[in-house]
Image (cartoon, rainbow, N blue to C red):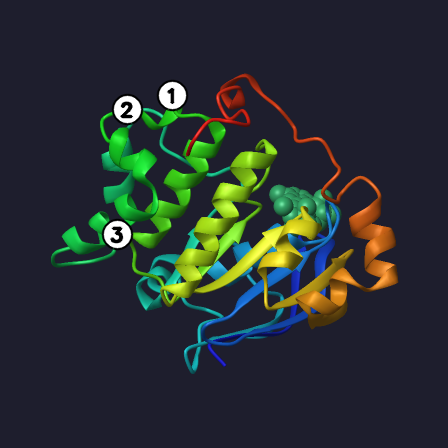
Amino acid sequence: MLLEIKDIHVHYGKIAALKGISVEVNEGEIVTLIGANGAGKTTTLKTISGLRGLSSGTITFDGKDISKLPGHKRVMAGLGQAPEGRGVFPGMTVYDNLLMGAYTRSGDFGDDLAEVFELFPRLAERKTQMGGTMSGGEQQMLAIGRALMAKPKVLLLDEPSMGLAPLMVQQIFSIIEEINRRGTTVLLVEQNAQQALKLAHRAYVLETGKVVKSAPAADLLDDPDVQAAYLGGGLGHDAPPERDGAESRDVPGEQA
Ligand SMILES: Nc1ncnc2c1ncn2[C@@H]1O[C@H](COP(=O)(O)OP(=O)(O)O)[C@@H](O)[C@H]1O
Ligand SMILES: [Mg+2]
């Protein structure tokens, strides 16, 4: 097993956000965590990457207990994260944003930059554009590209589909599939359960800080409880995407 989260409890002050979450990720897998707003998905990812501390429980990565390791050392060990809200540096160019992703590394990263540009031709076209002027979908590509520059063994993705039009969601998800095909393990957090379950090998359903179900992703697509809670009403594929001004270029018919 590449990444094991065992019975983790995480608090914000006195509030328990995670009440004993256990998740396993094997090398080569795409694992998804689905669940409604507030279920604890982001907190789980932040705890894995070291942005939140544990009250109890353990996180083991690549055979080592990393529960107390500082975040930057987790990046160096091979955990890469594209955070919720993307976290693109708005006043830096696309190129410089990507270089920031390689800050923990030494040596030549030319090949990795070339691979990011191959996966995301749009980023290659927009190398000198300021990150903050990119569309929502392009910023998501940049956030993933930047995480890849650290050469992660596991890529942690927090709601990459958030706020994107359906065509852009499809493009991002097919690139995630390609990244996985090329050898990177993926832990994907999504509210878009339909798309995430189609992409992932295995899935965990989170509700109010607990895992209430785990199964092969395909089984959950057919699970009546999951269908009722996450695929039929509001959170499934029929939910209209949130739109904002910056997203207006991601209309159907346009290419990535
Ligand atoms: N910075 C914070 N301070 C206090 N409570 C928080 C904070 N961030 C998240 N929470 C709470 O922790 C719980 C889990 O939140 P989160 O992990 O963001 O859920 P999700 O990503 O599934 O929407 C929620 O009850 C949320 O209100
Ligand atoms: Mg979240």
Q: Position of residue 249 (x, y in %)?
A: 48, 21
36 relative position to 100: left or right: right
Neighbours of disc 3 within 10 Å: few (<14), some (14-19), many (20+):
some
Kind of residue at disc 2: Gln
Confirm or deny contact between disc 3 and disc 2 (CB under 8 A).
no
Neighbours of disc 1 within 10 Å: few (<14), some (14-19), many (20+):
some
Q: In which quadrant is the C terminus drawn?
A: top left
Secondary structure under badge 2?
Answer: loop
Say if residue 127 shows up in the picture: yes
**Which comes sooner in the sequence, label 1 or label 3?**
3
Compared with 65, 159 (above or below) is above
Residue at 23%, 54% in the rendered image:
112
Q: Which mark is residue 129?
A: 2
Q: Nearer the viewer, residue 64 or 222?
A: 222
97 relative position to 230: left or right: left
- Alpha-carbon span between mark 2 and mark 1: 7 Å
Residue at 54%, 24% in the rendered image:
251
Kind of residue at disc 3: Glu
Say if residue 13 shows up in the picture: no
Q: Which mark is residue 172?
A: none
In the displayed orientation, state which residue is furthest to the top. 245
- Alpha-carbon span between mark 1 and mark 3: 23 Å
Q: How many marks?
A: 3
| Dot 2 beta carbon under 8 Å from ligand 2 | no
Confirm or deny contact between disc 1 and disc 3 (CB under 8 A).
no
Q: Which residue lies under the disc numbered 3?
A: 115
Q: Position of residue 30 (x, y in %)?
A: 53, 65
Q: Nearer the viewer, residue 196 or 252?
A: 252
- Alpha-carbon span between mark 3 and mark 2: 19 Å
| Foreground: disc 3 or disc 2 | 3
Q: Which residue lies under the disc numbered 1?
A: 133
Compared with 89, 190 (above or below) is below
